[in-house]
């Protein structure tokens, strides 16, 4: 890499005579006018850039790699020799056109690390980072505000400007500045736009300032994160969310709080749930999210946004979850017509697995035979305790598929789907597990006798009432008329034998 700096670049461009009258100004009672391109004029950067386009176009045709920015030019070569040739060709061309090269500010010796436009570029590690002086300036302002009771809104604005300007060299800077921005916006509203007014820094914002103080010296930004390792498709509807990754699908209904969210908020929540459900075991990977919602794409790629604070909070949660696993996420838009699988998962649900025992009944069971360590057959909507096992990928589940791990050291609660009761009984027998099951009193079923042989306490019958079984998202009652019983069971033969002997003695 190398760079060329043009000295007094604007002053190298003369103005035609008929345009000079528009640049007149008075100083010390004398009238002056510019004879060249004006420094500070709003249109000057664009005019100069347009003027230089043919110059750098010719250089590129000659095989020179360059990136001009006003009077600074970045040069690159695949080898040291190519970079030397690029420097020589570029300097010769610019000097022939009458430009003066600023030798002190230019870098004529090819390097793998150099300062360009106020950032340190490293072509070996392919990173961009801040120079030490800029790091110290931002840290000093952050410390001042972190430990001050009140600060001027103007000072906060100055710090925010430095933070935003640092983003090309600070990978996660966007994630840790919006709380301060929101505090500033709120303070300006209260002060009616008075930047000299004082404002308080909230505790959450102080935590973000701590991040800047602690992490800025070691922060950089990768120039390229490479192609994604996995593609995650997500979608949301008014009823629920859906996702697909590696040909594995999942989805679910919204709860009462999520149902009233704006569709943009639901789409971002769908991304969060999809990551937690399908990517929980991933680390050190790049995941690309495909969504048919442009707001979701924007908020993910920008690590948040200022238009909607709720959307910003959800996007922040997504990124923090990924940071814990060293996952990089990028988002791209996909037409709704091509997002068929995720869309279907957000609209089609299997409610037969969502039947839930009334919470009052569960509380009685817990007082009788609890506490339990885990709910073996549940979902995000019908779980009876924080730790639960789902039958399909679920954003909050401790495990997926209760039959995929050992139950021996777990004291569980289980209200299994009726179709798998036989498998549950068999697993308890094989793994000597212990827990409490809620099952229908169905003596005609083949599993009934085996279940009775696992009892270590007398079963408790649940009064037959339609309100005891319900769907968490509706008032619909279970269509079957049946009586349920609560059974404390154990696969240890000595425990079951002891209980049977106790029953015989009572007889």
Image (cartoon, rainbow, N blue to C red):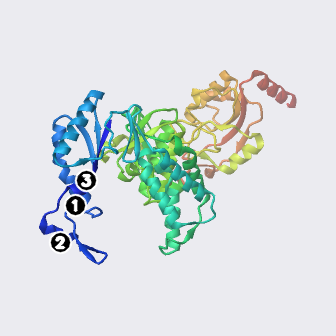
Contact? badges 2 and 1 (CB < 8 Å): no
**Label 3 secondary element:** loop
Estimate how packed mark 2 is, as few (under 14), some (14 to 19) or many (20 or more) residues with alpha carbons within 10 Å: few
Q: In which quarter of the image is the N terminus?
A: top left
Comparing 154 with 8, the one in front is: 8
348 relative to 140 in the view: left or right: left
Give the alpha-carbon distance from disc 3 to disc 2, as whole Å: 21 Å
118 relative to 78 in the view: left or right: right
Query: In the rendering, which numbered label is found on residue 37?
Result: 1
Per the image, the residue denoted by label 3 is 9
Residue furthest out toward the right: 505
Give the alpha-carbon distance from disc 3 to disc 1, as whole Å: 9 Å
Residue depicted at 58% across the width and 40% down the height: 378
Estimate how packed mark 3 is, as few (under 14), some (14 to 19) or many (20 or more) residues with alpha carbons within 10 Å: some
In the rendered image, residue 36, in percent from the top left (x then y), is placed at 20, 61
Residue depicted at 69% across the width and 51% down the height: 360
In the rendered image, residue 379, in percent from the top left (x then y), is placed at 56, 42
Q: Quadrant of the C terminus?
A: top right
271 relative to 80 in the view: left or right: right
Mark 2 or mark 1: name the one nearer the start of the chain.
2
382 relative to 495 in the view: left or right: left
Comparing 54 with 334, the one in front is: 54
**Label 2 secondary element:** helix
Per the image, the residue denoted by label 2 is 21
Give the alpha-carbon distance from disc 2 to disc 1, as whole Å: 13 Å
Say whether residue 440 is visible: no
Quadrant of the image occupied by residue 450: top right
């Amino acid at each position: 890499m190398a760079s060329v700096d043009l000295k007094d670049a604007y002053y190298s461009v003369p103005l035609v005579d008929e345009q000079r009258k528009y640049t007149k100004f008075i100083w010390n009672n004398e009238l002056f006018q510019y004879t060249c391109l004006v420094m500070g004029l709003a249109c000057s950067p664009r005019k100069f850039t347009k003027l230089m386009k043919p110059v750098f176009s010719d250089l590129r045709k000659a095989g020179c790699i360059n990136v001009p920015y006003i009077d600074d030019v970045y040069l690159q070569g695949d080898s040291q020799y190519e970079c030397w040739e690029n420097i020589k060709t570029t300097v010769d061309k610019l000097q022939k056109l009458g430009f003066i090269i600023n030798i002190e500010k230019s870098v004529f010796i090819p390097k793998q690390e150099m300062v360009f436009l106020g950032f340190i570029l490293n072509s070996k590690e392919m990173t961009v980072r801040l120079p030490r002086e800029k790091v110290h300036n931002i840290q000093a302002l952050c410390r001042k505000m972190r430990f001050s009771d009140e600060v001027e809104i103007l000072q906060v604005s100055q710090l925010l400007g430095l933070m935003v300007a640092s983003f090309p060299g600070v990978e996660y800077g966007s994630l840790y500045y919006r709380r301060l921005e929101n505090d500033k916006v709120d303070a300006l509203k209260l002060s009616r736009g008075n930047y000299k007014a004082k404002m308080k820094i909230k505790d959450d914002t102080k935590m973000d300032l701590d991040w800047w103080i602690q992490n800025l010296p070691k922060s950089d930004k990768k120039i390229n994160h490479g192609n994604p390792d996995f593609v995650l498709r997500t979608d949301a509807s008014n009823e629920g969310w859906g996702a697909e990754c590696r040909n594995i699908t999942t989805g679910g209904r919204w709860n009462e709080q999520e149902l009233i969210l704006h569709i943009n908020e639901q789409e971002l929540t769908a991304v969060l749930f999809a990551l937690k459900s399908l990517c929980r075991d991933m680390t050190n990977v790049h995941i690309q999210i495909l969504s048919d919602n442009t707001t979701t794409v924007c908020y993910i790629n920008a690590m948040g946004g200022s238009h909607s604070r709720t959307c910003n909070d959800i996007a922040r949660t997504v990124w923090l979850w990924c940071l814990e696993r060293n996952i990089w996420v990028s988002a791209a838009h996909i037409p709704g017509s091509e997002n068929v699988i995720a869309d279907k998962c957000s609209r089609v649900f299997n409610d037969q697995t969502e039947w839930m025992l009334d919470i009052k009944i569960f509380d009685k069971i817990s007082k009788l035979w609890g506490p339990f360590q885990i709910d073996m057959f549940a979902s995000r909507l019908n779980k009876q305790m924080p730790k639960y096992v789902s039958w399909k990928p679920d954003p909050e589940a401790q495990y997926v598929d209760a039959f995929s791990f050992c139950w021996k050291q777990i004291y569980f609660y289980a209200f299994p789907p009726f179709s798998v009761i036989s498998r549950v009984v068999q697993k308890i027998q094989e793994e000597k597990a212990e827990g409490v099951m809620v099952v229908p009193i169905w003596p005609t079923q083949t599993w009934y006798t085996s279940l009775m042989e696992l009892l270590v306490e007398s079963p408790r019958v649940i009064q037959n009432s339609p309100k005891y079984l319900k769907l968490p998202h509706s008032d619909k009652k279970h269509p079957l008329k049946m009586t349920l019983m609560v059974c404390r069971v154990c696969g240890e033969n000595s425990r079951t034998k002891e209980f049977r002997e106790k029953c015989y003695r009572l007889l």
